[in-house]
Image (tube, grey):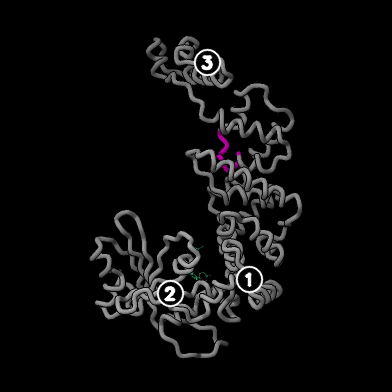
Amino acid sequence: RIGRVADAHGFSAYVVGGFVRDLFLYRHNEDIDIVIEGNGIEFARAFARKEGARVNAYDKFGTAVIIFADGFKIDVASARMEYYKFPAALPTVEMSSIKLDLFRRDFTINTLAIFLNPDKFGRLIDFFGGMRDMKEKAIRILHNLSFVEDPTRVFRAIRFEKRFDFSIGKLTAGLIHNAVKMDFFKRLSGRRVFSELRHILEEQNPIPALVRLEDFGLLKVIDPSIRMNKALRQMLDSARNVLSWYVLLYRPEECRQWIVYFLVLTRHADQEKAQAICRHFELAPRHEKIFIQERAEAETCLYRLSQGLPDKNSRLYEELNGLRMELILYMMAVTSRDDVRRAISFYVTDLKDIRISVKGKDLQKMGLSPSPLFGRILRTLLREKLDGRLQTRHDELELAR
Ligand code: CTP
């Protein structure tokens, strides 16, 4: 349908980039990027009208997002000569606009495109050896200035290498070493570096990429104080195990794995250093709070637990209640004590969801008028229930009385 609408406007339409790459790798990908040779915004409006969707258009960039009623989105870009700025040192070559669009991209495997117009529907466009590199399982840049143009691609290369179990090509690896040696990264803002790190920490298994970053001397680009030593490696492995365990519990609260891994990566930092890292990366205040205040609370709690585990469920509950799940999992990942880890996991699986059925209105029915006493009664009931002394609602009401 995209191809037909494009055709009617005299444009060529292609699906490009990650979607095509993942199609050949049999990987699920719902991010559809369309490039229109012609006016992408005009196409997006026409297509959306036909499909009953909305459009957000960005005139300055010639791009648009088509948003369907169910929330599904398609990104549309225009391939038009006047949009391209080129590194001056590159030779000038004649190219069609789709070829130019694809040439601006990071790696050959991301330069595949599929024609969508009806006459050539499904035809694969591969100008830069993308299919060869898919077969060779290689991450290769398109030209020697790729990392000069955009140093964040170094992090992307490593992320893709580990995600797909590919290898970074020899020349590309050499250019990464060069980028590290020449410190291309000093002109990147902390925010951009962090965004790449976060993408890595959101990968299914970020650990191989972190090890690879260290091999290239790139962890210190992220922060000079991070060292991939045995202790950190163990904590990262432990975080991975704990996160997998948590996923299998199918609990309703989401747990952002990047936060757990980032907490582990920066565990060595004291308050002041952690603050400096957060500022440098321009973290949102809500995230900074997790990495500074909430981490400090979790560390204090961990210290108390390792001094002696509570003898009652209710005391364990009171220790851990209120800490967000990312911090609970962080504590499980970093503790060297099996008994502490076991106690925390018991809290997550057996205690965290315990509730009493008696409510304030039940107390009112007993003739009590609302007061701070209510809170005390309800807390006592919960404590008793956690410690196994209340089985039924009847027991709760009895005790309340
Ligand atoms: N791209 C680039 N240089 C960057 C970032 C992106 O050339 N620094 C190009 C890539 O070629 C990519 C496209 O822009 O195909 C879209 O990038 P992104 O949204 O990151 O998508 P994916 O490559 O699909 O990555 P992911 O699978 O992680 O979403």
Picture disc at residue 168:
1
Q: Amino acid at mark 2?
A: Ala
Where is residue 383? Give x, y as percent: 56, 20
Residue at screen point 41% across, 68% down: 33
Could you tell whether 111 is left or right of 141 in the image?
left
Q: Amino acid at mark 3?
A: Leu
Residue tagged 3:
390
CA separation in Å, label 1 and label 2: 22 Å
Q: Is residue 289 above or below residue 80?
A: above
Residue 230 seen in the current view: yes
Residue 323 shown in magenta? yes
Label 3: few (<14), some (14–19) or many (≥20) C-alpha neighbours in 10 Å: some
Which is nearer the N-term, disc 1 or disc 2?
A: 2
Secondary structure at numbered mark 3: loop
CA separation in Å, label 3 and label 2: 64 Å
In the depicted view, which residue is nearer to us: 139 or 269? Answer: 139
Residue at screen point 70% across, 27% down: 309
Picture disc at residue 61:
none
Name the quadrant of the N terminus. Answer: bottom left
Which is nearer the N-term, disc 3 or disc 1?
A: 1
Secondary structure at numbered mark 2: strand
Q: Is mark 2 within 8 Å of ligand 1?
A: no
Picture disc at residue 113:
2
Where is residue 310? Give x, y as percent: 67, 25
Q: Is residue 341 above or below residue 370?
A: below
Q: Amino acid at mark 1?
A: Ile
